[in-house]
Image (tube, coloured by chain):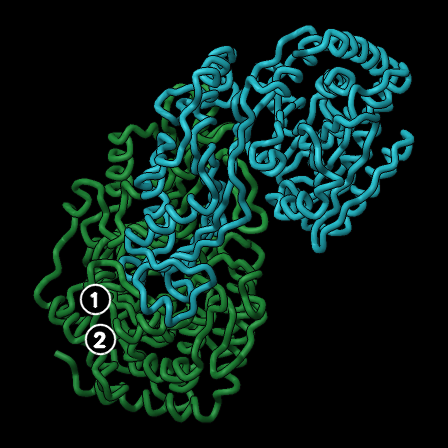
Chain colours: A cyan, B green
């Protein structure tokens, strides 16, 4: 049951937000610009601390006492509460960003630049824009004297892009401080059509760095080629044994753990606008993977993505040498019922069955001599998929508040294609969690020239006000 | 028929060289050190000119007037003549070196360092050591008042490592200046056993840079993986369609052009010491390519070598993105009767038959949209293989002079595994050419930390003296 009063409050708050944005847009943009200017790679201790301190100051300016939760060796989590009552809704986002390769950026990643209605910089969209929009929604409701409908708790993590290796510890160690009736996860991009979409789950993730070995020192390809094993060729064959060019994973039994989509989930996907043709054109794609199946379905399936391959040299630096090693970086996207441990086990078992001797540290010469095919696998932190039913009571409240506040029903994605650690928030499935992305899809998230459309930030202020007042 | 007088002269000259080295080794090493200190990548115009000028000065110091032959846009060829008579023997080497990646060097590539009896630096072995040894052999014979047996002409090229793109033009444009009765090609390493080997041919070479295409901008692997084509996977499958992990080239008909080895050639190979086991141990190889066939045979077969692969990022820079392109660098080693044009045609025809649309310039968006699989192929300069019969009269003279001067019969390799443009010198097969490598095989030629063993330089002085006096 959704209360009529709550719906009315959502609408009133959204209208107040619209007025606030009209009057204060330059200040909102300036607050975003200052925040994006702070370097925020999770491994950069000093930069991360500056970001956390900036968040505390930003809440303080609004009369909200934020504080830092700390776990040794991890970036702090910033938490802040606004409003009263027994019901607690946590709004999650992360303030760290992906590593950068500055040479590939048109403007430096932490020198925000505004061009054609977009603000460019690392984390402009992922996730600094949602954080700034939440703060602006607080301002809007405060100046209109609108109280939040529940206790709204902001929970901002500082190492999501590093795979959230300490989030579980935080949630256990600070169980009292973080316990909530539900979570809103404010990460990820809107649908490619520009329509608002909620996601009720997220794929899990695990990643691995794979290295194959050739001669212990680079060898002249003319004098030793055809005889000294070429590590690049070893690695291309290893990769091709894992995955075909239609994105199908070839490891026997890999899909056995996959939970099939429900009828309700299939119906929600059917409501999605067709964006595939326009995306193909925009991205200059002469084909897609997945034997023609639509993007909306493909991102609900397990994935094996090649992220990088590095060996020897190409271009002007190419030389006639067989390199000593070849390395590829792979990520796996997991769906409900798959786990990182399960995927790691299946991958390693399969490679072992193909004759690979698997090591997890750089092999010494005796190891390389003793085994014809040695591969080093270095697994990163990972986590499983998670999903809240589309028809849970909390799901229904979120859908209703946004529909009322914005005048439009949002799309409902059973899962986000990308990975956020929703499983941790859901406490074994007992606590619902819903994802609310607000940034443009063409934001170059995780790559060079990341950006956010400023009109999307404005819309987000209204959306957050609807939820703060209407949930 | 080999004259007894010539053999006696070879022995006398070798003995004079031995005495000279004993008395002047520090000066020889210092001349090598100064020469290696000059940066010499073929594309570095200024560096190349300094190398050429240094060579002219080094000959001048010995009373030999060297001069520069010039073709527009190419590094000069340095030529110098010593001795009299109608018979002319050209001694070829190159003074340019492979490009460097200084980060991989223990000491800077052009700051020569001496350690454990080796001199380290780019081109220390390939080919600056042979050049210095020839000059020292001249000194040795001059101080012992020994005249060369023929007119010895030194021909030093400045862009061999760039694929000798102007050598053919030089040989045509300066046909009178460069015409000879035979060529000695003083490039490449000795046999891995340390034994001196002559080579009577060389594999040809052609290289290609191969680029595949994904989305026009990097995409988040979670939101687009499984749907947006992964250019790394496209390229691994392309590579695997060309070559297996036993070095076999899978292009139909690829081996049709190959001339089989003669009985004499097979017999000469059978005399080679077995170095495979010790090489495997030294290089930490748990296997070799070629189904167990020995290195000496494998380097006489055509080869497809992967030299580099670059796409996205690995390691600390890895990010969850599908890259826009993937690029591999490949070289092909050619055997007699194969040509670069023939190989290029076979490779491109095969890829086209596999559904690839081949372009030679970076494709625009309409091209990428119109074709499901686009590959850019950028072919470098190349040249065919060449071979002088093991039993030609000149071959016999070279073998005899070295046997006499050094007291040991050299090994006879029908072809060097590496590529030198012997076909150009051979004038359609009419002029014999024999390769004489003098540097240690473990010289890191073409890679970081290139080096030459100084005891090999000393031996080379004797060898060159034997030939100058005995040919």
Residue drawn where x is 20% and y is 87% of the image:
B5
In screen coordinates, is B175 left or right of B251? Answer: right
What residue did someone put label 2 on?
Answer: B274
* Residues tagged 2 and 1 counted as in contact (Cβ below 8 A): yes
Q: Is residue B141 above or below residue A201?
A: below
Residue density around tag 2, few if under 14, some if 14–19, many if 20 or more, within 10 Å = some
- Pinpoint residue A304: horizontal percent, then vertical percent: 43, 38
> Which of the pair A70/B299 is nearer the observer?
A70
Q: Secondary structure at mark 2?
A: loop
Q: Is any part of residue A100 visible from this angle? A: no
- Pinpoint residue B48: horizontal percent, then vertical percent: 53, 59
Q: Is residue A228 above or below residue B15?
A: above
Q: Which mark is residue B294?
A: 1
- Pinpoint residue A199: horizontal percent, then vertical percent: 58, 23
Mark 2 — on which chain does it sit?
B
> Which of the pair B282/A245 is nearer the observer?
A245
Q: Is residue A227 above or below residue B270?
A: above
The quarter holding residue B91 reads bottom left
> Which of the pair A104/B234 is nearer the observer?
B234
Residue drawn where x is 67% and y is 32% of the image:
A126
The quarter holding residue A254 reads top left
Mark 1 — on which chain does it sit?
B
Q: Which mark is residue B280?
A: none
């Amino acid at each position: 049951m959704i209360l009529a009063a709550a719906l009315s409050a959502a609408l009133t708050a959204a209208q107040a937000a619209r007025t606030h944005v009209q009057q204060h847009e330059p200040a909102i943009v300036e607050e975003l610009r200052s925040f994006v200017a702070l370097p925020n790679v999770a491994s950069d201790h000093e930069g991360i601390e500056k970001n956390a301190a900036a968040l505390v100051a930003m809440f303080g300016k609004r009369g909200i006492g934020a504080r830092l939760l700390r776990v040794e060796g991890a970036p702090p989590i910033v938490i802040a509460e606004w409003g009263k009552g027994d019901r607690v809704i946590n709004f999650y986002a992360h303030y760290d960003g992906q590593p950068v390769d500055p040479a590939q950026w048109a403007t430096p990643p932490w020198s925000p630049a505004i061009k054609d209605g977009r603000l460019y910089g690392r984390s402009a969209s992922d996730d600094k824009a949602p954080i700034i929009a939440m703060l602006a929604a607080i301002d809007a409701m405060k100046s209109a004297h609108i109280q939040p409908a529940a206790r709204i708790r902001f929970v901002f993590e500082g190492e999501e892009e590093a795979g959230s290796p300490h989030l579980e510890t935080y949630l256990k160690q600070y169980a009292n401080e973080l316990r909530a009736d539900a979570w809103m996860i404010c990460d990820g991009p809107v649908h490619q059509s520009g329509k608002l979409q909620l996601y009720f789950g997220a794929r899990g993730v695990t990643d691995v760095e794979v290295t194959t070995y050739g001669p212990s020192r680079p060898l002249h390809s003319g004098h030793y080629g055809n005889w000294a094993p070429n590590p690049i060729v070893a690695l291309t064959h290893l990769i091709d044994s894992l995955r075909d060019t239609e994105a199908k994973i070839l490891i026997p039994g890999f899909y056995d753990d996959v939970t099939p989509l429900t009828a309700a989930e299939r119906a929600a996907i059917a409501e999605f606008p067709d964006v595939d043709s326009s995306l193909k054109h925009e991205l200059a794609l002469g084909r897609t993977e997945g034997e023609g199946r639509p993007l909306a379905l493909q991102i609900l399936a397990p994935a094996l993505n090649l992220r990088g391959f590095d060996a020897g040299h190409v271009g002007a630096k190419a030389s006639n040498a067989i390199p000593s090693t070849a390395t590829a970086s792979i990520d796996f996207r997991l769906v409900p019922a798959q786990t990182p441990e399960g995927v790691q086990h299946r991958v390693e078992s399969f490679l072992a069955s193909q004759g690979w001797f698997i090591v997890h540290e750089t092999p010494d010469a005796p190891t390389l001599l003793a085994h014809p095919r040695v591969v080093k696998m270095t697994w990163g932190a990972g986590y499983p998929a998670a999903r809240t039913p589309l028809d849970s009571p909390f799901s229904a409240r979120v859908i209703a508040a946004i529909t009322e506040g914005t005048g439009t029903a949002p799309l409902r994605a059973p899962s986000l294609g990308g990975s956020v650690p929703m499983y941790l928030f859901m406490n074994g499935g007992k606590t619902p969690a819903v994802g609310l992305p607000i940034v443009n899809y063409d934001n170059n998230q995780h790559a060079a020239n990341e950006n956010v459309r400023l009109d999307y930030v404005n819309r987000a202020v209204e959306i957050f006000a609807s939820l703060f007042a209407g949930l």
